[in-house]
Amino acid sequence: MLSSMSRSRAVGHAVIALSVLAAAGSSMAVVDPPNPKDLTQGKWELQLDGSKFCDPARTPQKSGRVIVDEGWGLISTLQTGVNAKGDPINGYYVYRYDGQRYPANIYAPRLSKEAITWKLVSPHRVEFEHWSKANTITERYVRTVSADGQTMTQTGKRTGQACEEVQVFSRR
C-alpha cells in the first residue's frame, strides 16, 4: 500500500504525464481542410508586403485571423497580432451569416462601439458592414478567397474616406 506522500507524488507524476501527452497530441493534430461552404474559415496570416493601409497609424506590425465554424450556425473570428505602436491586438467576434447585427468585440459586447452584419455571398466571398450605435454604416468590407483557397484578400473602406484598404492573408 502506498503512503499518502507516495500517492500524492504518483498523482503529481500522472498529471504531468497527461499534460505532456495532451500537449504533444495537440501539436500533432491534423489540420482539417477548408470548409467548402465557406473558404474564409481557417487560420490566416497577414502579408504586409501585399497589403495597403490608408492610415500608417493603423498599419499593424503583425496580424492574423482564425475563422471557425463553431456549430449551431455560429462563426467565430479571433484577430491577433501587434499594432503599429507595438501593442497586442486581440479581437474576437461571434456571428451568423443572417444579416443581424453582432457586437464588434465579444470580449466587451456592451462597450462595443459598433456592430457588424455578415453575409456569405459564396464559398469564396463574405461581405460585412460595421454599424455605429447611431444606426449608420461606418465601414464596408469584402473578404475573397482565391481559387486555390490559399490567399484571402480583405478590402475595406471607411465612410467618408476615399482610400480603400487591402489586406492580403496567406493560409497557415
Image (tube, rainbow, N blue to C red):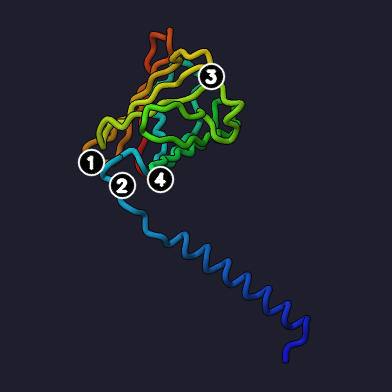
Q: How packed is label 3: few (under 14 Cα within 10 Å), some, or many (20 or more)?
A: few
The residue most toward the bottom is 1
Label pair 4/2, CB-CB below 8 angstroms = no
Q: Position of residue 114 (x, y in %)?
A: 52, 22
Q: Amino acid at mark 1?
A: Asp
Q: Secondary structure at mark 4?
A: loop
* Label 2 or label 1, whichever comes before in sequence order: 2
User: What is the number of the mark on residue 34?
Assistant: 2
* Label 1 or label 3, whichever comes before in sequence order: 3
| Image: 75 above or below 109 | below
Q: Position of residue 136 (x, y in %)?
A: 46, 13
Q: Residue at x 50, y 28 (%)?
A: 104
Residue where numbered disc 3 is placed: 57
Residue where numbered disc 4 is placed: 72
- Which is more foreground, mark 2 or mark 1? 2
Q: Is residue 99 left or right of residue 93?
A: left
Q: Position of residue 36 (x, y in %)?
A: 26, 45
| Image: 71 above or below 117 | below
**Quadrant of the drawing holding the C terminus:** top left
* Label 4 or label 3, whichever comes before in sequence order: 3
Alpha carbon of mark 4 to alpha carbon of mark 2: how far? 18 Å
